[in-house]
Structures are given as structure tokens and as C-alpha cells.
Amino acid sequence: MPQTSRKKQSAERGKALEILRGTFGFADFRPHQGEIVQTLIDGGDAIAVMPTGGGKSLCYQIPSIARPGTGVVVSPLIALMKDQVDALRQYGVAAAFLNSSMSYSQRRNTEDALIAGKLDLLYVAPEGLIGGGMLETLANIEVALFAIDEAHCVSRWGHDFRPEYLGLSVLAEKFPSVPRVALTATADEMTRREIAGQLGLRNAEMHIVGYDRPNIRYMISERPDARRALLDFIEEKHPSESGIVYCMSRKGVEKTAEWLSSKKLDAIPYHAGMTKEEREKNHNRFLREEGVIVVATVAFGMGIDKPDVRFVAHLNLPKNIESYYQETGRAGRDGLPASAWMSYGLQDLMMQIQMVDNSEADESFKRVERSKINSLLGLCETAGCRRRSLLGYFGEEYGKSCGNCDNCLNPPETWDGTVAAQKALACVYRTGEMFGVNYLIDVLLGKDTERIKSFHHDKLKVYGVGTEIDAMEWRSVIRQLVAAGALAVKTDGYGGLRLTEKGGAVMRGKESISFRKMPERKVSPAKAKKPPRVSKADISEGDMPLFHKLRELRSRIAKEQNVPPYVVFHDSTLAAMAKEKPADLVQMSFISGVGHAKLDKYGEQFLKVVKESA
Ligand code: ADP
Ligand code: ZN
């Protein structure tokens, strides 16, 4: 390597840290970020697999700024480009985007700036990059790097396949000397191989950051009145904070949003049945305003880049663990404490299984789907650490207990359920392995119903043998028997239950089984241990008023500029200001998230609020 270029490289390396601190105002790189940045600055290729909120953007933003020329970022999420560009401009970075939503003159302006070498970063959609002469334009200017975001979209078998992504293989051919980086949060082995193969990144440095999201607290349980429990959860743990509530159906969405609104929460619906305008309006309110709760079907998903979503709640069972992890992953991207809360019932489970059974898919596909539902149920019913079981599902070993999930914080009590299990299993067996949960429970409790009489099941030995526990508890027992693989839902689409081999063994007393206790349903207020508030854990009660004042100022600025508040400053930055109480601009510049440009633009205003409250 010639002397000059080596010298240039080491200067560029020093630059990386300078940009991280000066421009973005962050003290240090996160694990892997520094290495990826350096690889790209040195002209190498990389594949970065990082969980949501892991900090993928800086991996290509900093080298784009450090290297001569423009960094070209390929992203499928057109809706997000504007916010990303707005956020970069706030940091004083020359960024722009090109997409189909722009007018001719807007396009022209951006292209002129690109050709004149005025841009550090340019965001484009894959079809915009491959078509319309864009590649020719780029061939005539200096390109700092190509970043392919959401790179799993290249996978034909994945959930977000986009055919346009296959065209990106030309980048390797046409720009062999320009470094490329592919980024994704989807980490399975097959997808990784496809990314490397399809994008010509076989020699790229692979960086895989674990799946864990340590700031998310997982809480899962079955509750008799899920909506009420949700309200309690929000009021207690996340008052006036942003969150997403997922429901299975549109009707569920409408009803839940109405109900939460009637309880004075700022809740708005989002589902595919609403008009495009209504959806956009609600999406925007969620992004731009503080403390809005969106109640949504899974249609509300891709492209929620809001970093300060403090909770994601599921009022129904999600589709499988992959969906659950993706959906809950939208909470707490900023790294501050966040909650993933779920309430589910046996009914959800039956519905999921029936949906699979009644679908057009072939039998082998259905088998996979059913086993996924069972894994999900296993997660819901486990008495062990949720994080351990989640990560285990993705093939990551997590040796310890996390201390940040419901089971770790409040270990469930268990009871020897062998006798109860035998009764339930015998009831399934004696009634001919064809009935659903409600009927079985009626038989166990000895209910006097026409249906039971018509089958002469009131003459069975199991009729009325289960009165020692109530219907709620029986549901829990049956669910746990399904989760333990002792009972299986029949695949005929009617939701009847049958015994498995293991179920037979338990019924005959050859295997014992223990169940987790139902959580206490009514805890008297005096006895209830008040769990600490999940979010803003870093802010003491005394600093709260200042934090709120800083947020008010941020809201005003964001409104004036028509950008989401987090683009001005993140909650974590305001929290640090409230705690540190900087006395002057120099001290202000040490707060994480306050770079040069933001210090110039907002330093004085925020300092004034801090001083006034002193
Ligand atoms: P991803 O794209 O991986 O989901 P982002 O790039 O949006 O994540 O980063 C998530 C959050 O973490 C952002 O708010 C970002 O500003 C912040 N962040 C990233 N890297 C750092 C760092 N080194 N120090 C402090 N905050 C960081
Ligand atoms: Zn745990």
C-alpha cells in the first residue's frame, strides 16, 4: 500500500470517533459499530446483523461522512426516508432522498446537489437505484459506499421478499471498488447466506450482534378481563407514554381504541379497513405527538422507526414467536426501559390453530405452522425466564435468568397437578376425543346442560369430578396440558382436543406433571406490592418536572419545524439533561446526543429551561 494512502486511512479512522462525538454527540461506539465503521472506511465490505435499536444507521452514516463522496443508502421504506433525512439534517449532515413521491423540481434539485458532490448521504428505494439512469449518474460521481438496509428483503423465503432487491447484485459488478454493507435484524442462517450470495458479499466481514433486547421487559399472562388489565398496566407503568396495542381483528381494534379513549387515554385505531387518509393521519399523530397510543392490527408494522415507543401490548396471541419478537421489538429502540405485555386466552389459541387448518396450504406447511403455535404457547406457559426461552427459540443460549421478565421478577408458584391432569385427560378420553375446552370443563364441573345429556355424558365417571377448582383454573390446566404436549388440538378445524402419547402416560399415572398457579386475581390494594415504574428509570422523581419542561420545549420546536419530537432530541438526551443539569454550553455539549449542530441550534434554549428550574 502506498505511503500516502495509508496515512490518509489512519486520518480517516481518527475521523470516525470525531464524527461520533462531534456530529452525533455520542461518547462511544456500541459493540461491533466501531469495527463495521472501520471496515467500511478502509474500503472493505460488511454484513451487519443487529437487533432493532442496535444502532445500524451509524454503521454506514459515519463512514459516508468520513469518506470522500456520497454514501448511497438503499431502503425499501419510502415512508421513513423523510424522517431519516430530517434527523440527519438536525445533526448538520448533508442528507437527501430520492423517491417516487417527489415532484420533478424536487428531484432535479437533489440530483444537482448529488452531482455537485454536496451530499454526504443519499437515500433511495431499490427500484429508483436500478432504474431511470441512476446507476449512470453514480458512475460519474464519487460514491463513498453503498448501504443496503433491510437486506433480508433479498430472501425469497423470507417474510418481506422484494424482487427489486435481487437487482442489487449489479452493484458488485458495476462498482467493484466501492465498499458495500448489508444490514438487517433478521439473523437466521439461511437468510444470512442468501444475503451474502445475492448481493455478492461472500468475502464481507460478518458481524452478528445477539438477538437480546435487554431493555425490554417481557410480561405474559392470561387474564379474565384483558382490556381492564391493559388499562391498569398502562395507567400504572406507562402514563402519557407512546405505545402500540395489537389486536387480532379490526373489530377488536375499533372497540379497544374506543374503550381506552373513554378512559381518557389518547388512543387511536389503525387497520387495513380504514381509508388511506385516516391511516396516514393516525400514523402521523403517533410519530409527531407525545403519548399517543395506536391500537392496531398487524397491518401497523413495517416502518415504525419511532425510537421512543415505551410499550407494545398484545391483546391476543400473536401469530408465532417470530411475529411476537418483531412486534415487541418496536418498543424501546432508544435503549431506555420498555415493556412487552401480552394477554392471551385459550380461545386465541384455538382460533390460530383453526386458521392454519382451514387454510389452503399443504400439509407440510401446516405442520410447521402448528409446531410454531405450540412453541409460542410454550413461551406463554413457561414458569422459567421468558428471555431465556425466547432467545433459545432463535438458537441463542442465554445461560442465566434475566431479572427483567415477569417470571424472573415474580417467580410463579407451581402445584402438583398430576391428579387434576388425570381428570382432565380422562374427560377428553371418555367423551371420545372430539370436544372443545368449554364442553370439557362443563363435564368436569358437572354442569346440567342439554348438550351433555344428549350425549349421555352425565352418566360418565368423569362427570362432576372436577369441582375442587373453578372454570378459570381448568382452562389454565388444559392450556398447560396442551403446552406440555399432553393434549393436542385436533386438525379437523373444529378445535376438539385429543390425547397424545404423553397424555396417555400422564393419564395412567406413569408421569407426573406440575402446573403454574393462576396469578392472584384480586390483590387488595394494601397487599399489592407496587412494582417500580418501568420507564424513565433513570430519572428521579425530583428531576421529573424539569424533564417534562424540556419535553414541552422539544414539542414546540418539533411542531415549528414539522418533524417528530425525537428528531430534535431523544428522550434519553432530555433525561440526561434533567439529571446532569448542565450549567453552560460546554457542559451541555457533554450530554449524550448533543452534537455540534444541535448545540448551536438548541443549546441556549434548553440551557435556559434548565437554569430556570434550578
Ligand atoms: P436500528 O436501525 O439498528 O434499529 P438505529 O440506528 O435507529 O437502530 O439506532 C437506535 C438508537 O440508538 C438511535 O436512537 C441512535 O441514535 C442510538 N444510537 C446508536 N448508536 C449509538 C451510540 N454509539 N451511542 C449512543 N446512542 C446510539
Ligand atoms: Zn427473565
Image: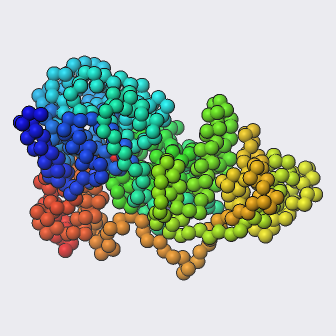
Q: Which quadrant, please, contains the N terminus?
A: top left
Q: How many marks?
A: 0
Answer with the quarter of the image where residue 174 lies.
Answer: top left
Q: What residue do we see at 26% from left, 43% from top?
A: 36
With respect to residue 297, does 579 lie above or below?
below
Colour basis: rainbow
* 42 in relation to 235, above or below: above
Q: Quadrant of the C terminus?
A: bottom left
**Residue 127 relative to residue 585: left or right:** right
Foreground: 384 or 83? 384
477 horizontally vs 604: left or right: right
| Front residue of 525 and 365 | 365
Q: Residue furthest bottom?
A: 526
Visible in this render: residue 336? yes
Q: Residue furthest left?
A: 4
Q: Is residue 78 visible?
A: no
Image position, residue 307 (x, y; %): 34, 51
Image point (52%, 49%), residue name: 393
At x 16%, y 70%, the residue is: 611
On screen, residue 268 versus residue 422, left or right, reads left
The residue sitting at 19% across, 66% down in the picture is 609
Q: Is residue 30 above or below residue 405?
A: above
Looking at the picture, how far across and down is residue 400, in whole percent?
47, 63
Of residues 457 and 144, the one drawn nearer to the viewer in this rendering: 144
* Percent coordinates x, y for residue 522 in the rendering: 62, 72
Residue 3 vertical position relative to residue 562 in the rendered view, above or below:
above
